[in-house]
Each structure stands twice: as C-alpha cells, then as structure tokens.
Image (cartoon, coloured by chain):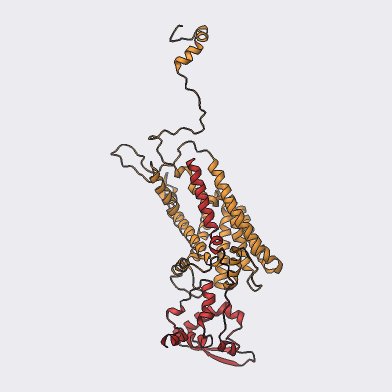
Chain colours: A orange, B red
C-alpha cells in the first residue's frame, strides 16, 4: 500500500525535476516549452476521442439504469421522476444533476460496527471535497484562458474579480487556487487515513492526485512567491495557440517548465486513466437510460431475423418421426 | 442510428471547446505590447530598484508601501544608489511613481491589460496626469 504512494510520489517528483532541469538548459527550453505541450495537446484530444468511440461501440442491449427512487407504478404511488426516470426529459434532468452536483456521491454512506450491530451513516465530506475540487479546478482552467486569448474577454476578468473577492495581498490571492490545492490534499489524506479506502487505493489513484497537487503547488509558488514574468509567459502561450511558438526569454524561471510539463503529463495520462470519467459520465448506461422496461418492449438490436415457427408447423414437419419414436402428437396424420 | 449522432455531436462540441483558443486567435496574431518609458522617467535613469527586480517586485513594494503609510504613518522609502549614497523617496503611487512615469496608459496599463491583471490601485488612487487632461 505504502509502495503505491511512494511510487506515485517519486514519479511526479521525477517528472517535475526533469522539466525543471531541462528548463534551465537553453537548448531544451524548446522541447519543454513548445514540443511537449503540443504533443500533449494532440495526444489528449485524439486519445479522448478514441476512448469515447471505443466506449460508444460497446453494446448496451438492455436497460440497466441504477434506480435510486420509486419506479413509476400505480397512480397513487408517488413516482420519483429524476432518480428513476421513465422519459427522456427525466433522464436529461438526472444527467444534469449528476454532472453538475454529483448526486451519486451525495448518497455516500459510511458503515461502522456499533456494539453488535452494523450501522450506516451519511458521509458528506467526500461529496463536499469533490465539489470543491472540481469547481475550483474548472475556475482555474477558465482563468488560465487569459494566457491563451488576446484581447482577454471581459468574462474572464469578471471571473478573476469574483475569485479575488477578498483582495488579499498583491499579486491578489485567487481563492480557487488555494481551494484546489486544499481539496486535492484532503482527497489524498482521505485515501491514506481511512483504512478501507487505503486498501483499495492503487497507483492509478495516487498518481493523478500527486500530479494535480504538483500542478497546483508549482502554479501557486510561481504566482505568489517567485512572481514570474507573466508578460513573457503570455508571449510563450500566445505563440503556442497562434502556431508561431517562440521560446520565452532566459530569465523566466525553470519552475514554469516544471508546471508546464506536469500539465502536459496530466493531458497525456488523461485519456488512458480514470480521469476519463470526464467523458465517461455522459456514457454511463446506469445513469443515461430511462427505466421504462415495463412500459416499452426493448428488443436486442442484434437478434437474428428468424422465421417464427408455430407448433402446428413443427408437428407437420416431424409427425412421422415423432410417431416412430412414440411421442404424443395432436393430429395422427 | 440515434446514438451515433449524439456521440458525434458530443465529441465535436468537446473538440471545438478544447481547441477554441486556436479558432479565436486565428489571424489575430499580434506582437506583445512593450511598455513605453516617459521622458521624465528616461531622464531620471534609475528607479528605486533595477529594472528586472522592479518587474518582479513592484506589486509587493506597492503593497508594502500602502501598509506602511496607512498603518504606521511611515512615508519615507530609503534607497542606496550606485554610489552608495542614500536617497529618499516618498511612498506615494500618484506622486512618486506617476511623477516620473507620467504615462499610465502606455506604461502600467499596457502589460496589465495584456496579462489581464486588474490591480485595484485605481479604486482609490487617481492618475494625476489623466485628471489634468480631463479638466482642460
């Protein structure tokens, strides 16, 4: 178990160190600043599309929604139309709330043995940390668009203003960055401190967590402690998105390359890992199918097209053989 | 098939969103703006710190100045210049900084708006030079 944590941690530290060292060498800045980010973006996009099409090809012949509420039944039994939807509208609502508010995590419970009985209680912290993590990550990604768009759209300025609402320090503190790091650290602590969760945690669970902690850590460090030259960095990022990339001046801290390389590693790792739940949540048949098996007949789409044979026809064909074998028949001849 | 259309639409939306900086910036490639030094700043030759350090630290210095002036009433910033002589600067954004850098739009705002940095200095302070122009 501890090996999983150590190996993931070492992998992330080594990745960061390679890029930090590479970014300090003038000739390699091209590799870490331009080529690897481009390669990562291409692998991410193509890998993501490949994974979605791979999933889309898997057969889903039957309705297999998980039902989390009362099925549609008699008129006097109250139907739960979101947690047990029978219509497309219900499914859309269910998917919307699943994607936006993580309803299935909200139902998380914890079981304990109290005395001689098993007791279950509602456990809200995973849901809260997941919400904090995903929404702060989204905010951070949107805020980074200021480096990729020129002129910077007003909506990004509005998000920055809201994010820096408390006006702490200069450069002003963005709440989302701190929440992202805090939530990722909580999610890691949870894996280590809850024995059952620790038992089922693999490298594939720790590695992305450490990657994101590394990305958030290097980002915060650059913004608040190194105060890197954002003007020079924007020249690099704008060069990347206008396909005229140039290496930024040498006085930009190598920490930038560590940050950029960890982001590239995350993008490359993304399509081949559990992080694909970003696309997969839309395709989960336990959520996106209506539970209407009792209303509508669903026929397996790849059933072979066979001729329907009645018993009368069958007996006509085999009557003589059946009589010979002593089997009872309905008509003697 | 119905599902095929939905999948292709979803993947297309994702691809467009992911690559949107490419489309939005297409044909709009511009050189990064360079801050322009005002005549007075050029004549003064030296700021309170060398250029590179000013670039990285000016926000910290201004934040420190604000706390020093507002909380402690301490308004004097001492600097040793190249000859080792001590020089006094008044801690004042509008008078000291903008006294030399008389062109806020060309000096401050150029990089700030390029990097979408919106310092809240101007919630309280005014640009004295802009005010002069406005009253004329």
Q: Quadrant of residue B131?
A: bottom left
**Residue at horizontal 54%, vertical 62%?**
B21
**Residue at horizontal 52%, vertical 53%?**
B14
Query: x and y percent of residue A58 in the render?
Result: 54, 40
Q: Quadrant of residue B46?
A: bottom right
Q: Which of these two is toward me, A120 or B107?
A: B107
Query: Could you tell me if residue A195 is visible in this image?
Result: no
**Residue at horizontal 46%, vertical 76%?**
B120
Quick check: B15 above or below B104?
above
Circle count = 0
Query: x and y percent of residue A33 in the render?
Result: 64, 64
Query: x and y percent of residue A213 in the render?
Result: 56, 61
Quick check: A27 above or below A66?
below
Query: x and y percent of residue A217 in the render?
Result: 56, 65
Q: Which of these two is toward me, A7 or B95?
A: B95
Q: Hey, which residue is sitting farthest front in the picture? A: B27
In the image: residue A258, left or right of residue A129:
right
Q: Which of these two is toward me, A291 or B131?
A: B131
Q: Quadrant of residue A257?
A: bottom right
Q: Hey, which residue is sitting farthest left in the picture? A: A76
Q: Which of these two is toward me, A302 or A20?
A: A302
Quick check: A19 above or below A303?
below
Query: Could you tell me if residue B61 is visible in this image?
Result: yes
In the image: residue A196, left or right of residue A3:
left
């Amino acid at each position: 178990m501890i090996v999983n944590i150590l190996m993931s941690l070492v992998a992330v530290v080594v990745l960061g160190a390679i890029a930090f060292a590479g970014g300090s060498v003038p000739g390699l800045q091209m590799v870490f600043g331009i080529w690897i980010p481009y390669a990562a973006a291409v692998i991410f996009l193509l890998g993501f599309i490949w994974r979605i099409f791979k999933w889309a090809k898997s057969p889903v012949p039957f309705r297999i929604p998980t039902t989390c509420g009362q099925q549609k039944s008699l008129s006097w039994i109250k139907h739960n139309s979101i947690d047990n939807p029978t219509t497309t509208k219900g499914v859309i609502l269910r998917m919307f709330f699943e994607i936006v508010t993580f309803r299935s995590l909200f139902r998380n419970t914890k079981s304990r043995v109290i005395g001689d009985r098993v007791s279950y209680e509602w456990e809200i912290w995973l849901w809260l940390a997941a919400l904090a993590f995903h929404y702060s990550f989204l905010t951070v990604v949107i805020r980074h668009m200021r480096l990729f768009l020129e002129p910077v759209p007003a909506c990004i300025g509005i998000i920055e203003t809201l994010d820096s609402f408390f006006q702490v320090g200069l450069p002003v503190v963005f709440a989302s960055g701190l929440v992202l790091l805090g939530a990722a650290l909580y999610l890691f602590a949870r894996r280590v401190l809850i024995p059952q969760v620790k038992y089922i945690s693999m490298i594939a669970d720790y590695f992305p967590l450490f990657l994101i902690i590394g990305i958030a850590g290097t980002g915060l460090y650059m913004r608040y402690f190194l105060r890197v030259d954002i003007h020079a960095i924007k020249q690099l990022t704008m060069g990347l998105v206008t396909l005229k990339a140039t290496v930024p001046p040498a006085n930009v801290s190598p920490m930038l390359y560590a940050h950029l390389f960890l982001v590239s590693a995350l993008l490359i790792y993304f399509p081949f890992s559990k992080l694909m739940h970003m696309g997969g949540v839309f395709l989960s048949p336990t959520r996106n199918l209506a539970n209407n098996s009792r209303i509508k007949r669903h026929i397996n789409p790849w059933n072979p097209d066979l001729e329907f044979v009645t018993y009368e026809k069958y007996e006509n064909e085999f009557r003589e053989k059946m009589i010979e074998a002593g089997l009872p028949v309905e008509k003697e001849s | 098939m119905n599902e095929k259309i939905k999948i292709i639409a979803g993947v297309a939306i994702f691809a467009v969103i992911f690559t949107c900086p490419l489309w939005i910036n297409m044909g709009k490639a511009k050189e990064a703006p360079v801050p322009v030094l005002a005549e007075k700043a050029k004549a003064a030759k030296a700021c309170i710190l060398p250029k590179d350090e000013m670039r990285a630290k000016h926000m910290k210095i201004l934040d420190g100045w604000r706390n020093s002036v507002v909380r402690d009433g301490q308004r004097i910033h001492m600097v040793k210049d190249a000859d080792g002589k001590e020089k006094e600067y008044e801690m004042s954004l509008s008078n000291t900084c903008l006294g030399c850098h008389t062109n806020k739009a060309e000096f401050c705002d150029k990089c700030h708006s390029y990097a979408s940095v919106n310092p809240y200095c101007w919630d309280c302070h005014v640009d004295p030079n802009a005010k002069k122009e406005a009253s004329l």
